[in-house]
Image (cartoon, rainbow, N blue to C red):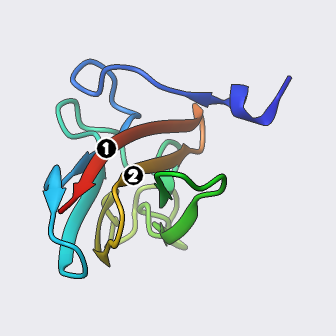
Amino acid sequence: MAFADLFQSADWKQEKHVPVIEGPETVKKGEVALFQVTVGKEIPHPNTTEHHIRWIALYFAPEGEKFPYELGKVEFTAHGESVAGANQGPVYTQPYATFAVKLDRSGVLYAASYCNIHGLWRNEKSVTVT
């Protein structure tokens, strides 16, 4: 099996694991643009010790280039764990991240996320630079 085959995708309105990329479809060259990536936008993803999103990563593939650039990766490390037991802790991080980027060329944003039970998920969004 190829590594790419390990990534799952689906309609994010019907599947709670798909990373959803929100932000402008058109940005001005060299200006800061904000892109939010969330998991569980329409259908909340569980955030428990036993079942949670571990991380979200965002990449940008400019038109005309072979390789993407990693824009960032956010890890979510609190899922209710504590010395009292599973789901007894005082804090739960949520799978939501905002990336501020400057783009000089049009291309495609690729988001990836990892569920500790259901594996790797992906989504993409085209962005035009004017």
**Which tag, 1 or 2, sits closer to the chain's start?**
2
Farthest residue toward the right?
1
**Kind of element beneath mark 1:** strand
Identify the image quadrant of residue 45: top left
Identify the image quadrant of residue 125: top left
Crowdedness near tag 1: few (<14), some (14–19) or many (≥20) residues, C-alpha within 10 Å:
some
Q: Residue at x 16, y 49 (%)?
A: 25
Q: Is residue 25 above or below residue 57?
A: above
**Kind of element beneath mark 2:** strand
x and y percentages locating residue 114 in the rendered image: 55, 47
Q: Residue at x 30, y 60 (%)?
A: 94
Crowdedness near tag 2: few (<14), some (14–19) or many (≥20) residues, C-alpha within 10 Å:
some
Q: Is residue 80 above or below residue 30?
A: above
Viewer-closest of 113 and 105? 105
- Whether residue 80 sits left or right of residue 22 in the image: it is right
Tell me the CA gap for discs 1 and 2: 6 Å
- Disc 1 marks which amino acid? Ser
Q: Which residue is mark 2?
A: 107
- Disc 2 marks which amino acid? Gly
Q: Which mark is residue 51?
A: none
x and y percentages locating residue 36 in the rendered image: 24, 60
- Whether residue 104 sits left or right of residue 27 in the image: it is right
Q: Is residue 127 above or below residue 36?
A: above
Identify the image quadrant of residue 106: bottom left
Viewer-closest of 103 and 70? 103
Q: Which residue is mark 1?
A: 126
x and y percentages locating residue 27 in the rendered image: 16, 64
Q: Residue at x 54, y 52 (%)?
A: 64
